[in-house]
Amino acid sequence: MIKEEKIIQHIVCWLKRYIKKSQSNGFIIGISGGIDSSVTSYLVALTKLDTIILEMPISEKEDSLLSKKHAKFLTDKFDNVHYLKKDLSTLFISFCHTMNIKNKTKENTLLALANVKSRLRMLMLYYYANIKNYLVVGTGNKIEDFGVGFFTKYGDGGVDLLPIADLTKSDIRLIAKKLNIINEIQEAKPTDGLWEDQRSDEEQLGATYEELEWAMKIIKKKNYNFCTTENKKILKIYQTLHRKNNHKLVPIPICKIPKILKWE
């Protein structure tokens, strides 16, 4: 059995054990047409347990044909997979109206609104999860979740379990190939689909996933001796992002009260 098959089998078994322990009825996962959510939803489907794949467009240009193709691909293949689509555009527009947002050109406003979109999707996922006693499955990879913190706190970071978070984007591409994920999805440029200008992940991060994977390994080994000027630039990008987003990567700080000050 090749490595990809062993990893697939390991994740599927882990999902089955986890849901049995949690006493939940099934899984729900948001799909975007990206490679991470496509691979994760396929792995969840392989458990043969009840699975909802939920598409949540917020504006027409985000209504990806790839997510529809992947949904059809999965529902044709698995009887346990059910597809839902909920357009959240009206909800997002209502939020903007409530906040009286007039200038949507400032970068900090654009970032805040991108995070709002992610958090609206989290609300929708947990609505269904609560009603059906399902687990919300996250789609973050190792670089995003433990390297540079490339996710929205309490948005796509608000999940119950993370099946592919110990895999890099390169690993996920190998798994996608093994699972015969639609070629268009495998070849598509990674994007979170949260920005009006449809900027890619690499444009936001300032480096490719492969470059960030390299930086993560180098920092772990603490071997910088052979780094070129370009290498050092990538390392700096990784370290800057890691430091900036570290608050997402560590447990929420608790102010511990000394016993002498407590009533008990």
Image (cartoon, rainbow, N blue to C red):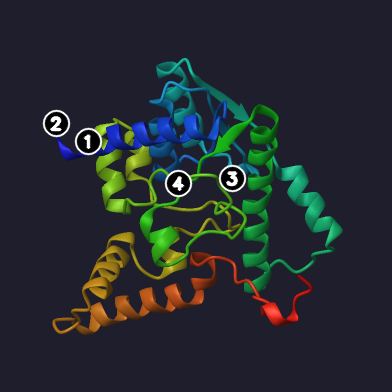
Left or right: 128 with respect to 74?
A: right
The one of 199 and 207 positioned closer to us in this rendering: 207
Residue shown at the point (14%, 31%) measured from the top left:
1
Q: Which residue is mark 2?
A: 1
Left or right: 172 with respect to 119?
A: left
Q: Quadrant of residue 173?
A: top left
Type of amino acid at the residue the image marks with label 3: Lys
Q: Earlier in the sequence, mark 2 or mark 4?
A: 2
Secondary structure beneath label 2: loop
The answer for how far apart the CA atoms under marks 4 and 1 are is: 18 Å
Q: Earlier in the sequence, mark 3 or mark 4?
A: 3
Percent position (x, y) of residue 224? 20, 82
Q: Which residue is mark 1?
A: 6
The answer to whether marks 3 and 2 mark residues whose Cβ atoms lie closer than 8 Å is: no
Percent position (x, y) of residue 83? 56, 25
Secondary structure beneath label 4: loop
Q: Is residue 34 visible?
A: no
The one of 196 and 75 positioned closer to us in this rendering: 75
Q: In front of the other: label 3 or label 1?
A: 1
Secondary structure beneath label 1: helix
The answer to whether marks 1 and 2 mark residues whose Cβ atoms lie closer than 8 Å is: yes
The answer for how far apart the CA atoms under marks 1 and 2 are is: 7 Å
Q: Earlier in the sequence, mark 3 or mark 1?
A: 1
The answer to whether marks 3 and 4 mark residues whose Cβ atoms lie closer than 8 Å is: no
Left or right: 187 with respect to 244?
A: left
Relative vertical location of residue 46 with respect to residue 211 in this rendering, above or below: above
Percent position (x, y) of residue 191? 46, 53
Q: Earlier in the sequence, mark 1 or mark 2?
A: 2
Q: Which mark is residue 120?
A: none
Q: Which residue is mark 4?
A: 162
Q: Which residue is mark 3?
A: 61
Q: Earlier in the sequence, mark 4 or mark 1?
A: 1
